[in-house]
Amino acid sequence: KAGKAAWAEHEALSGFRTPLTCKEWVKCEAIRDRVLAHPRISELLLGDGVNEASVVWEDATGVTCKGRLDRLCQFEGRPTVVDLKTCMDASCFSFERSIAKYKYHGQAAWYLRGLRSIADIGRRFLWLAVEKEPPYEVAIYEADALTLDEGDRLCAHAMNLWKECQESGDWPGYDTGINVTTLPEWALEMSG
């Protein structure tokens, strides 16, 4: 009973944050140290700027939209949005695949849409890719125009679909028919 009371007090005092183990804390410090050892990344993160900047705007569809940017700053004389991404492999080859798989380019375009609605000043978008395992390699990647155009197309499609669903009240989910399925090849090999 006393332990439950102590834990409840701890949670209340910590603001109900998830505690880290010592091992997790040491890993976080190692990642932080590796990130800040990179001269360009430390300039991006420690120079003038705003962390976790919130942006609220009205989309062309009339829908109120929001975004929460990791960092908004000036970098190399240009207004810049910085987005931190953890990954298993920060190499260019692998990170480009992560951009496509997780639709990071849609997120980048979304943030830039919101900022353009406030002031259209030609911001650049940078990803800081940080590996989650030692040696915690780091890299900076800039979204090119083609990537941002494709991301903007994703955003436009999503906003149009959102508006259609709001107006019709029909929110599609999975296919309502009967779908035929089979085991993946690796599972078939294991069962035989």
Image (cartoon, helix red, strand yellow):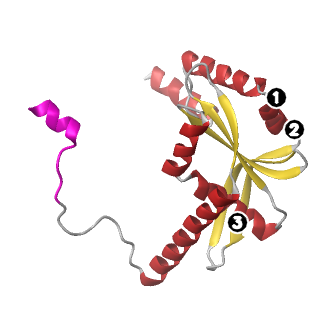
Residue 16 in sight in this render: no
Q: Earlier in the sequence, mark 2 or mark 3?
A: 2
Q: Is residue 80 left or right of residue 1?
A: right
Q: Earlier in the sequence, mark 2 or mark 1?
A: 1
**Which segment did they paint magenta?**
180-192
- Under mark 3, the amino acid is Arg
Where on the picture, by quarter, is residue 85? top right
Q: Which residue is mark 2?
A: 47
Q: Quick one: label 1, few (<14), some, or many (20+) residues within 10 Å?
A: few
Where on the picture, by quarter, is residue 26? top right
Q: Is residue 15 left or right of residue 176?
A: right
The answer to whether 98 is drawn above or below residue 152 in the figure is above
Q: Are marks 1 and 3 in contact (CB under 8 Å)?
A: no
What SS does tag 3 mark?
A: helix
Q: Residue at position x 19%, y 62% from top? A: 179
Q: Which residue is mark 1?
A: 39
Q: Quick one: label 2, few (<14), some, or many (20+) residues within 10 Å?
A: few
Residue 149 circle label: none
Q: Earlier in the sequence, mark 1 or mark 3?
A: 1
Disc 1/disc 3 C-alpha distance (Å): 29 Å
- Under mark 1, the amino acid is Pro
Q: Which residue is mark 3?
A: 113
The answer to whether 157 is drawn above or below residue 68 in the figure is below
Where on the picture, by quarter, is residue 144? bottom right
